[in-house]
Image (cartoon, coloured by chain):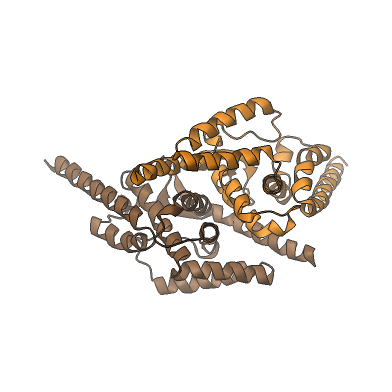
Chain colours: A brown, B orange
Amino acid sequence: MQLTALEKQLDFLREIDRLKTVVRQSPLLDKSRKENSAEHSWHLAMYALLLNEYACGTVNTHRVIQMLLLHDVVEIDVGDFPIHSGSSSELQAEQESRAAARLFGLLPQQQGNELLALWQEFERGETEDAKFAKALDRFQPLLINVFTGGGTWTENSVSLEQVFSRYGPVIKRGAPLLWTVCEQWVTQHFAGQASGMSRQTR
Amino acid sequence: MQLTALEKQLDFLREIDRLKTVVRQSPLLDKSRKENSAEHSWHLAMYALLLNEYACGTVNTHRVIQMLLLHDVVEIDVGDFPIHSGSSSELQAEQESRAAARLFGLLPQQQGNELLALWQEFERGETEDAKFAKALDRFQPLLINVFTGGGTWTENSVSLEQVFSRYGPVIKRGAPLLWTVCEQWVTQHFAGQASGMSRQTR
């Protein structure tokens, strides 16, 4: 009985190896290549471990880390939906729900249900833990874009107003002090771009 | 004051982005490329989350996950020391200690000390949490080798006896039931190799 449970758990752990091959839009900070969703999830868990004092509410860091470790596994079935792609979020939610059911369904029932519930809690973004986790999931790619001189914003011709509206509410809700830092970074980034452009057109 | 702490934390989080460029010997399960240490750390944290019931002692899964998230960050300075390389473990330990001091020294003092202590606890491998974490850190590459038809064992001409001696004690000590499974896998793997070789030489 226990071995059967273990076999299911090992099946799941082998299956999620594929998250290492899901490539995101964000580059590494050294710009050598794009980031994949497995290493992104590792990095976010480290963000949660280091920055939990900036959460808006009282959070359980262990739960936040768990959410961030598994928040992207659905991409194994449906791929990454980039923030600037403008794709239908309803279609995305439906596809991701099916993927979550399939993947967590590989596990022993009780464990699978627990992880599915945690994934759903993250997706809904209503609890303090989920709000903070979602804030970090927006904060990390914003940081990458700022420190790589534009990243996905440059590639997708994203404006300052779009950055504010696409990242601001989620980060501000879960980690207001981090958003204060972001506002400074983003304002400086686009001011630098504008002055760079005006120099080019001189 | 708080902003200065945050600046240090963000420096650290940017610095450890480099773990994504440290390439290990182990392949991905689909053999498309070698695994890097950041995604390896993510996968190990998932192993800890899923398999904590197989720990030999009573473990705190939150601490085990934290250890596994940060156990390899020293490789940013010193690279990965492959298990089958035969390099000096004393030299390795000294270099890794220096790297840990530098990296965790980027953080606010108290937080840096806490994470350094956790890293040292993992390295010493004496507590129940560290024993289980170390067992998983051996179990995951063993699983990869079995399910990729040999992996680093084939590349380094590693024998069944060497697998038993290099992986066995650590896995058995932290997660005895997982070692029982490994013994079956490894025995079958090398039996298959031997029969494959005898077919080739027929």
Q: Quadrant of the C terminus of chain B?
A: top right
Q: Is residue A28 left or right of residue A154?
A: right
- Which residue is farthest left? A202
Q: From this viewpoint, is residue A148 visible? A: no
Q: Residue A115, position in %: x, y?
A: 59, 66
The residue positioned 51% from the left and 41% from the top of the image is B19
Q: Nearer the viewer, residue B173 or B184?
A: B173
Q: Is residue A177 left or right of residue B176?
A: left
Quadrant position of residue B92: top right
The residue positioned 68% from the left and 28% from the top of the image is B89
Count of numbered circles on the image = 0
Quadrant position of residue A15: bottom right
Q: Residue B193, position in %: x, y?
A: 81, 45
Quadrant position of residue A174: bottom left
The residue positioned 48% from the left and 35% from the top of the image is B105
Q: Is residue B76 left or right of residue B191?
A: left
**Image height check: is A117 above or below A71?**
below
Q: Nearer the viewer, residue A109 or A106?
A: A109
Q: Residue B11, position in %: x, y?
A: 40, 40
Q: Quadrant of the N terminus of chain B?
A: top left
**Image height check: is B127 above or below A134?**
above
Q: Residue A124, position in %: x, y?
A: 45, 71
Q: From this viewpoint, is residue A87 visible? A: yes
